Image (cartoon, rainbow, N blue to C red):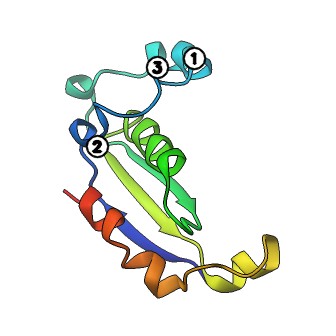
Amino acid sequence: MVTVAILWLSTGYFGGIGAPFAPYFWPYLAQLPKKKERKRPVRVYMDGCFDLMHYGHANALRQAKLLGDQLVVGVVSDEEIVANKGPPVLSMEERYNTKIIHLLVK
C-alpha cells in the first residue's frame, strides 16, 4: 500500500539550493507550454521512500516541481521498502511526519 501526501511546493523554496536543472531535461522544457498559456494546472507525481531525507531528495523534488504547477509526492510503505531495499530506518509514519517534508508544504 502506498500513502500519498499532496505537497504544494514552491519553487522559491528550492531556488537557492540544489544543482542546476539536469541538462538532459533542457530540450523537453522548451516544448512545455508556459504556465500562463496552460488551460489547467499540470500535476507532477513523484514518489520515494524518503528514508533519512537528504540533499538529493530535495534536489529531485525541486526539479520535479519545475515541470508543473502542483507536485504530488508519494511516500512508499514499509512493506514496499522491505521488499525492494531492506528494512527502513524510519517507519512510514515517521517518514510521512518528518519535519523537513512539512517545511516543504506551502
In the drawing, what numbered circle is on residue 51?
Answer: none
Q: Which structural element holds mark 1?
A: helix
Nearer the N terminus, badge 2 or badge 1? 1
Q: Which residue is mark 3?
A: 29
- CA–CA distance in space, label 2 to label 1: 24 Å
Which mark's residue is nearer the viewer, 3 or 1?
A: 1
In the drawing, what numbered circle is on residue 23?
Answer: 1
Location of the N terminus (image quadrant): bottom right
> Type of residue at label 2?
Pro
> Type of residue at label 1?
Pro
Residue at 48 percent of width and 46 percent of height: 55
> Type of residue at label 3?
Leu
Image spot of residue 37 (x, y percent): 24, 23
Q: Residues within 10 Å of mark 1 (few under 14, many from 20)?
A: few
- CA–CA distance in space, label 2 to label 3: 16 Å
Image spot of residue 94 (x, y percent): 45, 83
65 in relation to 94, above or below: above
